[in-house]
Image (cartoon, rainbow, N blue to C red):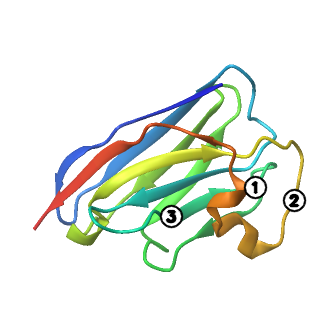
Amino acid sequence: VQLQASGGGLVQAGGSLRLSCAASGRTFSDSVMGWFRQAAGKEREFVAAISWSGSMTYYADSVKDRFTISRDNNKNTVVLQMSSLKPEDTAVYYCAADSRRRTTYGEYEYYRRSLYDYWGPGTQVTVSS
């Protein structure tokens, strides 16, 4: 199983970027998927997650109303649309996936790294001021 994130890059504050995570090796169309990020010298933190059905989404307070997570099950991908970017959004962004299928969790479980079994190598997002 592989997760490969793409779409990172350098953008000015206030700009937008679209990250994609393509999965291969198995389908994740009915598994929880999420995005985390890690800034230099900091812990990896939760950014956003989407339930297995796609009906529920979860966001860190710091990105709420600016980022949108969605999934394209036909392409076995999850997308993170980021807008109104700020310099503090600068980090390596990782996509992650739960190995379990058709499983629903309590809200706070989605924020925990321990829920996710598969991780991609990350893509750098740099926001200049």
Q: Residue furthest top?
A: 25
Instruction: Indicate which disc, 2 or 1, sits on the residue closer to the N terminus.
Output: 1
Check whether the beta carbons of the residues at disc 3 and disc 1 lie within 8 A of each other: no
Where residue 52 appears, as percent x and y from the top left, is 79, 49
Distance of label 2 from label 3 (alpha carbons): 19 Å
Identify residue for label 3.
47
Identify residue for label 1.
51
Q: Quadrant of the C terminus?
A: bottom left
Where residue 6 appears, as percent x and y from the top left, is 39, 34
Q: Quadrant of residue 99?
A: top right
Check whether the beta carbons of the residues at disc 2 and disc 1 lie within 8 A of each other: yes
Compared with 7, 84 (above or below) is below
> Secondary structure beneath disc 3?
strand
Where residue 16 appears, as percent x and y from the top left, is 29, 54
Q: Quadrant of the N terminus?
A: top right
Give the label on residue 5, or none. Answer: none
Where residue 126 appears, as percent x and y from the top left, is 21, 54
**What residue sits 35% from the left and 61% below the top?**
83
Identify residue for label 2.
104
Q: Is residue 53 left or right of residue 82?
A: right
Compared with 126, 73 (above or below) is above
**What residue sits 62% from the left and 60% below the top?**
113
Instruction: Indicate which disc, 2 or 3, sits on the residue closer to the N terminus.
Output: 3
Q: Residues within 10 Å of mark 1 (few under 14, many from 20)?
A: many
Distance of label 2 from label 1 (alpha carbons): 7 Å
Q: Quadrant of residue 88?
A: bottom left
Compared with 108, 28 (above or below) is above
**What residue sits 44% from the left and 71% below the top?**
63
Distance of label 3 from label 1 (alpha carbons): 14 Å
> Secondary structure beneath disc 1?
loop
| Residue type marked 2 | Thr
